[in-house]
Image (cartoon, rainbow, N blue to C red):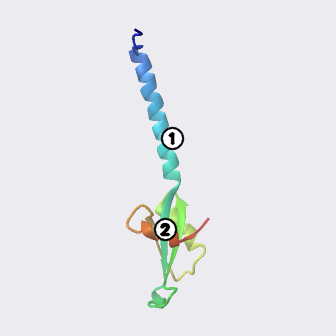
Amino acid sequence: MNEPEQLNLADFAAELEKKRRKAERDNRRRRDRRAFIVFATDPEKVGASDYKLTFAREARTEAEAERKVRAIVDESRRVTAYLASGKYGQQLPEARWVA
């Protein structure tokens, strides 16, 4: 019967460090590609069909997502971004994606 190979402390520490680096790399990739729902509302068009426009954008931060949408909508619109994994996530399929 073969005995299982026992790890020594150095090998165990190296294995833990390797797992930690992989987790950090995965988390960094996840942070870099967060999806945001961005609403652009125009207070002067309350009740109109184009009062609220919905966009989707991958960005690192809410501010970055808002800047991208701000570049393509009228200045009079209010722009607000939310993480797509939050309470507005169900609107993601209908949102217009912004590159």
Q: Nearer the viewer, residue 12 or 69?
A: 12
Measuring 49% from the left and 70% from the top, which residue is drawn there? Answer: 38
Where, quadrant-wise, is the N terminus in this rendering?
top left
Residue 25, disc? 1
Measuring 39% from the left and 10% from the top, which residue is drawn there? Answer: 3
* CA–CA distance in space, label 2 to label 1: 26 Å
Element type at mark 2? helix
Q: Which of the two marks, 2 or 1, is nearer to us in this view? A: 2
Quick check: 70 left or right of 14? right
Residue 92, disc? 2
Tag 2: residue type? Leu
Total marks shown come to: 2
Quarter occupied by residue 47: bottom left
Measuring 49% from the left and 36% from the top, which residue is drawn there? Answer: 22
Q: Residue furthest top?
A: 1
Depicted 86 relative to depicted 19: above or below: below
Residue 16, disc? none
Badge 2 crowding class, 10 Å Cα cut-off, few under 14, some 14 to 19, many 20 or more, is some
Measuring 48% from the left and 59% from the top, which residue is drawn there? Answer: 61
Task: Decide which of tag 2 and tag 1 comes sooner along the chain.
Answer: 1
* Residue 74: % across, % down: 57, 81
Q: Nearer the viewer, residue 59 or 95?
A: 95
CB-based contact (under 8 Å), mark 2 and mark 1: no
Tag 1: residue type? Arg
Badge 1 crowding class, 10 Å Cα cut-off, few under 14, some 14 to 19, many 20 or more, is few
* Residue 86: % across, % down: 39, 63
